[in-house]
Amino acid sequence: MKRKLSLPAWIFIGMFAGILAGLCFLGNPGFTDEYIKPFGTIYINLLKFLVVPVVLFSITSGVISLKDLKRVGSVGVRTFVYYMCTTALAVVIGLILASAFKGMFPPLDAATTAALEYEAKESPGVMQVIVNIFPDNLLKPMVNTDMLPVIVISILFGAGILASGEKGKMVGNAVDALNDVIMKVLMMIIKITPFGVFCLMCNVVAVNGPKIVGTLALVIGVAYIGYILHVVVVYGLSVKCLSGMSPIKFFKGIAPAMITAFTTTSSNATLPVSIECCNNLGAEPEVSSFVLPLGATINMDGTAIYQAVATIFIASCYGVDLSLGDMAMVVLTATLASIGTAGVSGAGMIMLAMVLTTIGIPVEGIAIIAGVDKIFDMGRTALNITGDATCAIWISKQEQKKAAKKAAVAE
């Protein structure tokens, strides 16, 4: 009897087939852009279509499943602290790596830097981010896919259902049923992931292939070294020491989500696949339903490494040496900025503009790397969702240990 290939295997095949096909179209990227990319866009649209209902019903269902408002608060605080710590570590790794290669980043002449143009989107202040978290309209955040307010709505509804006791059970059952329906739709879309990955990867290679060769190849390489180091060291140790799981088992299980993130460059679009992978790895469904949507919005480890590397690279291009104080400000700004940055493709550029402004580097410098931002984005998004998964596994292990202790005491 022949053994059927698993979904992760098909996703790997789709990715490599896309790379090979993209190489074949290096001289004719217009064809892939016109006839192949649209199918990948359809796949992304289907994933994005599910983002709001998945977050809304999964977090609400997760809060209800936790059964205790104190437990909801406990899980939320631990998740937030974990995310902020790993993001700060990511910035430090990025700064150390970029500083080591700084001498190889050539400064640009005055005429070149003067010709640079980049119009930065306005980034909200800290207080505005806090205000924006709390919606003034129930439907507007869902229509705009503004995930922080959607998360707040989900938590409040879940808390309200728990606080209503017996009266809230009927609504809770309806939410659980809707969550099950959404998950069934999710599985239908996940099955076409290999095809979507093929189309997206084919177009990315065909369009960007020649651009990665040259002076920008070094800074892209430094960023990817940072991504790999963070995955192996920080996430590997987290999974091994905090969760007691084999890193190999973890990375094998989360691979489909990493590939999906790599090709879609959107943490939110990858969310349905991430939840499925974490549940298969043994995460508690109520925990992954709560932790992962939160992480897709506020946990940006890959983006943080990109900020650090890009900041030092752009500073070097302008002939500016960053002081320890400047670097400390980069760590602080990039960590805090990750909270208010949406988990969508290209959001890292907005964060970078914020970081550059904070330390006095011309924002126009972003134009130097804007052309290859997609390549940075692919790696940093894959890293972002991997960090979310490590947190979900860790919190799940902690909750399982607590449950086991309570059961032992009860006996």
Image (cartoon, grey):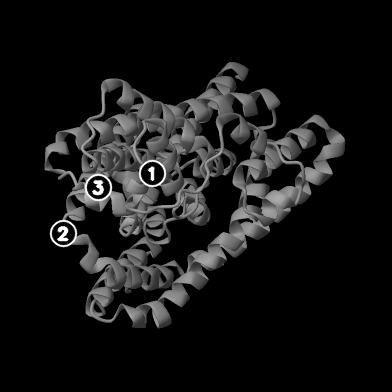
Q: Residue visible at 36% across and 57% down?
A: 262
Q: Nearer the viewer, residue 187 or 104?
A: 104
Secondary-structure class at tag 2: loop
Q: Which residue is mark 3?
A: 224
In this picture, residue 266 sits left or right of residue 73: left
Observer able to see residue 312: yes
In this picture, residue 321 sits left or right of residue 281: left
Q: Which residue is mark 1?
A: 363
Classify residue 394 by image quadrant: top left
Secondary-structure class at tag 1: helix
Discs 2/1, front: 1
x then y, percent, for residue 155: 68, 37
x then y, percent, for residue 39: 46, 76
**Is disc 3 in contact with disc 1, using a CB cutoff of under 8 Å?**
no
Residue 214: which numbered mark, if any? 2
Numbered disc total? 3
Of the residues shown, which amino acid type is indicated by label 3? Tyr
Discs 3/2, front: 2
Discs 3/1, front: 1
x then y, percent, for residue 350: 46, 46
Classify residue 261 by image quadrant: bottom left
